Image (spheres, rainbow, N blue to C red):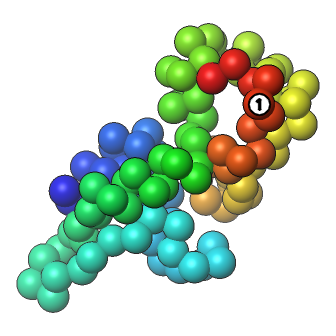
């Protein structure tokens, strides 16, 4: 699928998605394939699955935890879950799934 559609499905904006693809975050976080004639890169389903298994966006956590924004922020703070990358620089909140404690009900 196109990178733009993949970013939308992951719950991140296109600017944040492009930053993830750029390699500036210790390698490419979300791998894509570029075709010389195409304007938009393509993200393979395996790359999406790999990304989802390693990272969680704030939007995906809201859906998985079935809670509201303030409640999720409190839950993350209570478990000392920090963003994987600076949200202000990236433009999106991502945390590593490995950083979510087992007791975190998601």
Count every numbered label the image shows and give the total: 1
Q: Is residue 39 above or below residue 7?
A: below
> What residue sits right under mark 1 in the picture?
102
Residue sitting farthest toward the left:
37
| Picture quadrant of residue 3 | bottom left
Report crowding for label 1: few under 14, some 14 to 19, many 20 or more residues within 10 A (C-alpha): few
Q: Nearer the viewer, residue 98 or 69?
A: 98
Residue 59: x, y in percent?
53, 31
Residue 76: x, y in percent?
79, 29
Who's the residue at 27% across and 76% down the image? Answer: 33
Q: Is residue 62 above or below residue 96?
A: above
Who's the residue at 48% across and 47% down the image? Answer: 52
Q: Is residue 73 visible?
A: no
Name the quarter where the N terminus is drawn: bottom left
Left or right: residue 76 versus residue 13 is right
Who's the residue at 77% across and 45% down the image? Answer: 99
Q: Is residue 67 visible?
A: yes
């Amino acid at each position: 699928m196109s990178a733009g559609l993949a970013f939308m499905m992951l719950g991140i904006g296109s600017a944040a998605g492009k930053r993830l693809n750029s390699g500036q975050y210790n390698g490419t976080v979300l791998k894509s394939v570029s075709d010389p004639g195409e304007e938009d890169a393509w993200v393979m389903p395996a790359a999406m699955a790999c990304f989802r298994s390693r990272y969680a966006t704030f939007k995906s956590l809201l859906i998985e935890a079935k809670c509201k924004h303030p409640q999720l922020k409190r839950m993350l703070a209570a478990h000392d879950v920090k963003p994987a990358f600076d949200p202000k620089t990236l433009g999106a909140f991502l945390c590593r799934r490995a950083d979510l404690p087992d007791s975190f009900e998601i």
